[in-house]
Every structure is written in structure tokens, then in C-alpha cells.
Image: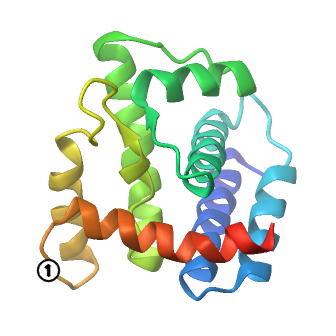
Amino acid sequence: MTSDMTLAVVHGLIGRFFTKIREKDAEGALCALDRLKNLELDKKRDRRAMELRGAFLVITERIKNKEPIGYSDLAKALNEKYDLGIPEFGSSMGRKIGGILGELSAISYLSSGLVASIYVVNKNTGEPGGGLENLYKELSEYACESPAFDKESLKRDLDEVFDTLRRNS
């Protein structure tokens, strides 16, 4: 498979996971999760796919356990688990992690109305970064919807549908 095809498969499996979890279909969500975990990726050729899959796996585990994760902790976890060499502090880390989270949120929101990155927070404030609201508004336009941005209801929606996964794994 080419790197473009591999990235498309990762996008598709993440989208399928969020669609199935929104439908409260634990079996379908777990199948997509399993396929994603077992997808063979080449570190050099499939770097973006590895970053996206890694972030997805780390974040979904944190959502399942209802444990927010800080931006720098996410970078550190990606480096420890997947050896991706992502900067762990500073503006370089912010740009890299922000790009990964934006892509992941686009996939999750457009496939299910859920915003996966709501669990990634600033360690000092315990809140998602300021870019999340802008991203949400932009994605809402693509989804042909214009709901008001409300972090609490977004988090509550995500927790509610993940209860299905918590009960079945």
C-alpha cells in the first residue's frame, strides 16, 4: 500500500470507530479499534498515519478511563509508545500536536458529531486549548450544522457514548 492509501485506511478506521461508538455498537467499534491497532505501518513511509493512529489510541484510552491528558503528556506518550520524535514542549510541540488533534477531531466530528480532542487539555487550566472552539465552528460548517460551542456538552456526549465501550471491553 502507498503511504496515501495507508493514511486513508487509518482515517477510515478512525471514522468507523466513532460512527460505531456513536451508534452504541460496541462490537463494531471494537472491531475497528482492533484493525487499527494491528495495521502494519512503516515508520518512515507512514509517519503521519503513525502519528494519527498513536494519538487516537492514546486519547481513546484516556477517554475510556475518563482521564484528560495534557498536550505535552500526549507528545511524551506518543514518543514512548511509538518512538515518533515529537517535541515535548514549546511552540514546536504545540504546532505538531495541534495539527494531529485537528485532523483527529475533523475525522471524529464529521463521522459522528463527537470531538475526540476534548480530552486533551492544558495542564495548568485543565481545559482544552483555545483553538478547539475555532476548529469546532469550522467543522460545524462542513457538517451542515451550526450548534453552539459548549465544552461541557461535548465532553458529556463523548462520555455517554464511550460508556458502551467501557461496558464491553
Q: Residue at x 20, y 43 (%)?
A: 131
The correct choice, above or below, for 123 with respect to 133 in the image is above
Location of the C terminus by quadrant is bottom right
**Is the image coloured rainbow, by chain, by secondary structure, or in one colour?**
rainbow
> Residue 147 location in percent, x, y?
16, 79
Q: Would you say 55 lies left or right of 142 here?
A: right
Quadrant in which residue 96 is drawn: top left
Label 1: few (<14), some (14–19) or many (≥20) C-alpha neighbours in 10 Å: few
The correct choice, above or below, for 100 with respect to 37 in the image is above
The correct choice, above or below, for 146 with respect to 159 in the image is below
Residue indicated by mark 1: 146
> Residue 45 location in percent, x, y?
71, 33
Q: Residue at x 28, y 42 (%)?
A: 128
Q: Would you say 138 lies left or right of 154 here?
A: left
Residue type at the position of mark 1:
Ser
Q: Residue at x 27, y 23 (%)?
A: 124
> Residue 100 location in percent, x, y?
45, 40
Task: Look at the numbered disc 1 and give the secondary structure of its residue.
Answer: loop
